[in-house]
Image (spheres, rainbow, N blue to C red):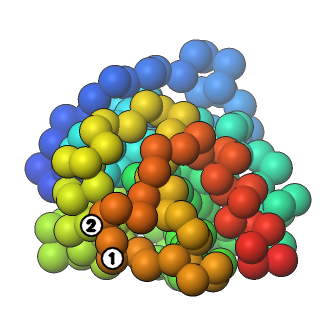
């Protein structure tokens, strides 16, 4: 099912497969396509960290910090810049952390993961051009890191300047962004 994802982004790197208790949980059962992805790829990095699949349990309290995020959100992926992809109310959505907004990406996560990440779409959704420059400067991220923009866009940052990014802890950076939009 995810051959197109692998053709677009390559094979998963640093794969961490979920345990059986997760795979049988209600959270994992929320979407059949995501369950298949978690079984095959687990939580992984793709294309040197341009895109990541994530353990949704690590983002379970997201709506506490981000008022724009619905309480039923199941985060399944992220990009290198802390934008989060999630399932909510039967739709695939994107939390654009710098702008503090939610974008609707369509009804099915598997459609997004197979067609939405093709090279023609990666520029906008994953910001591939700036990623290449920042990655060259800062290196490959660890699973708990992202490239944080300083200052953040709402505080006058320039998201097109590779020198404005730092390697930071993902969860802490998400909290900083949420506060800047509160």
Q: Nearer the viewer, residue 153 or 3?
A: 153
The mark found on residue 130 in the picture is 2
Q: At which x and y percent is residue 72?
A: 78, 60
Q: Nearer the viewer, residue 60 or 124?
A: 124
Q: Residue at x 31, y 44 (%)?
A: 138
How far apart marks 1 and 2 lie (CA) works out to: 7 Å
Q: At which x and y percent is residue 38?
A: 46, 35
The mark found on residue 160 in the picture is 1
User: Is 67 left or right of 173, judged from the image as shown?
Assistant: right
Q: At which x and y percent is residue 83?
A: 51, 63
Q: Residue at x 46, y 21 (%)?
A: 17
Q: Mark 1 or mark 2, which has the lower sequence index?
A: 2
Q: Nearer the viewer, residue 134 or 25?
A: 134
Q: Is residue 37 visible?
A: no
Above/below status of 155 relative to 152: below
> Residue lying farthest front?
163
- Label 1 crowding class (10 Å Cα cut-off): few <14, some 14-19, many 20+? some
- Hey, which quadrant is residue 90 in on the image? bottom right
Question: Which type of secondary structure does the marked residue at label 2 adopt?
Answer: helix
- Label 2 crowding class (10 Å Cα cut-off): few <14, some 14-19, many 20+? some
Q: Residue at x 33, y 72 (%)?
A: 161
The mark found on residue 95 in the picture is none
User: Is 21 left or right of 82, judged from the image as shown?
Assistant: right
| Contact between labelled residues 2 and 1, with CB atoms less than 8 Å apart | yes
Q: At which x and y percent is residue 110?
A: 39, 58
Q: Is residue 162 visible?
A: yes
Q: Residue at x 20, y 68 (%)?
A: 129
User: Is 39 left or right of 123, judged from the image as shown?
Assistant: right
From the image, which quarter does the C terminus lie in?
bottom right
Q: Nearer the viewer, residue 45 or 23?
A: 45
Question: Which type of secondary structure does the marked residue at label 1 adopt?
Answer: loop
């Amino acid at each position: 099912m995810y051959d197109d994802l692998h053709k677009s982004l390559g094979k998963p790197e640093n794969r961490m497969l979920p345990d059986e208790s997760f795979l049988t949980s209600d959270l994992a059962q929320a979407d059949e396509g995501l369950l298949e992805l978690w079984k095959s790829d687990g939580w992984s990095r793709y294309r040197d960290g341009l895109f990541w699949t994530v353990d949704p349990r690590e983002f379970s309290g997201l709506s506490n910090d981000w008022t724009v995020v619905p309480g039923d959100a199941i985060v399944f992926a992220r990009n290198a810049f802390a934008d989060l992809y999630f399932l909510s109310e039967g739709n695939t959505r994107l939390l654009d952390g710098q702008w503090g907004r939610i974008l609707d990406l369509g009804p099915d996560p598997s459609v997004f993961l197979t067609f939405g990440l093709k090279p023609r779409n990666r520029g906008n959704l994953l910001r591939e051009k700036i990623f290449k420059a920042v990655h060259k400067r800062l290196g490959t991220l660890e699973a708990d890191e992202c490239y944080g923009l300083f200052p953040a866009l709402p505080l006058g940052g320039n998201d097109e300047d590779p020198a404005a990014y730092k390697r930071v802890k993902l969860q802490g950076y998400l909290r900083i962004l949420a506060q800047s939009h509160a």
